[in-house]
Image (cartoon, rainbow, N blue to C red):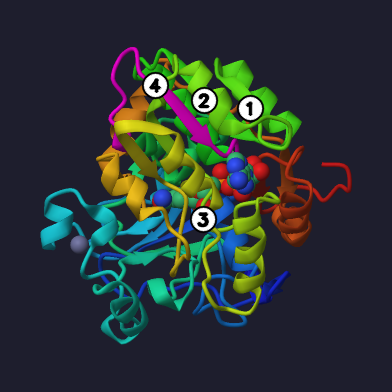
Amino acid sequence: MRALTWHGTHDVRVDTVDDPEIINPRDAILKITSTAICGSDLHLYDGVIPGVLPGDVLGHEFMGEVVETGSDSTLKKGQRVVVPFTISCGGCFHCQIKEFSACENSNPVEKQDVSATLYGHPMAALFGYSHLTGGYSGGQAEYVRVPFSDVGPIVIPDHLEDEKVLFLSDILPTGWMGAENAEIQPDDTVAVWGCGPVGLFAIQSAIVMGASKVSAIDHYPKRLELAKQLGAEVIDFRKTDVREALMEMSGGIGCDAVIDAVGMEAHGFAIDNMIDVAKQKVGIGADRASALKQAILAVRPGGRVSIPGVYGGMTDKFPLGALMEKGLQVRSGQTHVQRYTKDLLAKIEDGTLDTTFLISHRLPLEDAARGYKCFREEQDSWTKVILKPGMKQERNA
Ligand SMILES: NC(=O)c1ccc[n+]([C@@H]2O[C@H](COP(=O)([O-])OP(=O)(O)OC[C@H]3O[C@@H](n4cnc5c(N)ncnc54)[C@H](O)[C@@H]3O)[C@@H](O)[C@H]2O)c1
Ligand SMILES: [Zn+2]
Ligand SMILES: [Zn+2]
């Protein structure tokens, strides 16, 4: 089959690789109908996540048609399903308490050492996201093997087209959990750093949860425009002093809740970020946490800090004093996708959530390398890229 494979920093290619096979009775095989490129994939593309090997098939946001099932799968051939990017067994301690992204069984023991050493506990498995998280082949491909297919996938009714539901695989639940972790109350003032797909869904979720004012921070005009259309006030961090603007927006108190939807590759010429960029290049210090640091300084005392943005290692000059002295609550994590899919599917169906406004480009799978390059280098206009195996190849997507 054809699949998008990683070969090194900024080097991904569509290659012919082996077709997936059922290797466990709980597996299912999907024929991919739609898959997307995520901001998290850019961390792999930029070479800042360890443990990716040449030839690895990427992709953790996908949906498709069930074409083969193991004897213990609950899926049926022909069903259309969306698959959570977190691979979870459903039976372990964490899965039982719905902490699916902390599943103890999905990441094979022989892959657990690095994350166990780095984090004190091994990570659960994710699709297409390095050998740190299991080394499973991802779904930017014609076919994918779905382990624990009796737990994760959600069956999609025929009347809902792919584009409405594809983001149930990751960014919609991630934005939602980002807002939920910020414990949004009616009348809250909220600030969201990053108007990429995750930030945009966090903004939409915060508004649905009743926030009275949401400020959105980025430096790309088109992304800020999308945030504005959702009802946010927007701040271009290259033109405006973010903290001052947020103090004004919150009546001089500071925001009740802040959401970091940027993660470990923050942009900007703040001095701490420039130093972090240099350190990340040589592999020391590692995470560029400039947006998170700004968020911690901007939130009010007693406020809530939610971090859906991905961090992988260590970061320097972290404002621990502000965190402690202001009495902040912090919540983070890879999304417990399986916890949210059913409710969010209902919210898509009844029109509470719009999931298509951010799609900027649709490309054939064969054009995936171009999709990665443009999604990274032309972020302003390439907001979200969908790849479709079998789609006719045109140069003007
Ligand atoms: N927790 C999870 O389970 C989960 C799931 C999916 C994605 N993520 C993470 O969420 C983050 C965002 O994902 P995305 O797909 O929206 O990515 P993206 O790269 O499309 O968007 C990031 C946005 O942040 C903006 N930005 C950069 N520096 C900034 C700064 N200093 N201040 C304000 N904005 C800044 C960028 O301009 C960009 O628009 C990534 O780190 C991704 O890995 C986490
Ligand atoms: Zn993703
Ligand atoms: Zn589990």
Tag 4's secondary structure?
loop
Q: Nearer the viewer, residue 182 or 26?
A: 182
- Residue at position x 40%, y 30% from top? 157
Disc sitting over residue 181 in the figure? none
- Residue at position x 88%, y 42% from top? 396
> Can you say whether 173 is above or below 158 in the image?
below
In which image quadrant can residue 48 be found? bottom right
Q: Which residue matches tag 2?
A: 246
* Closer to the eye: label 4 or 1: 4
The quarter in which the N terminus is drawn is bottom right
Label located before the other in sequence (3 or 1): 1
Amino acid bearing label 1: Ile
Tag 2's secondary structure?
helix
Is residue 150 visible to the viewer in this orientation of the structure?
no
Left or right of 343: which side holds 34?
right
Disc sitting over residue 289 in the figure? 3
Left or right of 384: which side holds 329?
left
Whole-percent x, y for residue 305 in the image: 35, 40
Q: Which of 193 and 241 is in front in this view?
A: 241
Label located before the other in sequence (1 or 2): 1
Q: How packed is label 3: few (under 14 Cα within 10 Å), some, or many (20 or more)?
A: many
Measured in 3D between alpha carbons, the distance from the residue under mark 4 to the one under mark 1, in whole angstroms, is 18 Å
Q: Which residue matches tag 1?
A: 235
Tag 3's secondary structure?
loop
Amino acid bearing label 4: Ile
Amino acid bearing label 3: Ala
Q: Does the magenta stretch include residue 341?
A: no
The segment highlighted magenta reads 180-196
* Closer to the eye: label 2 or 4: 4
Label located before the other in sequence (4 or 1): 1
* Closer to the eye: label 4 or 3: 4
Q: Which residue matches tag 4?
A: 253
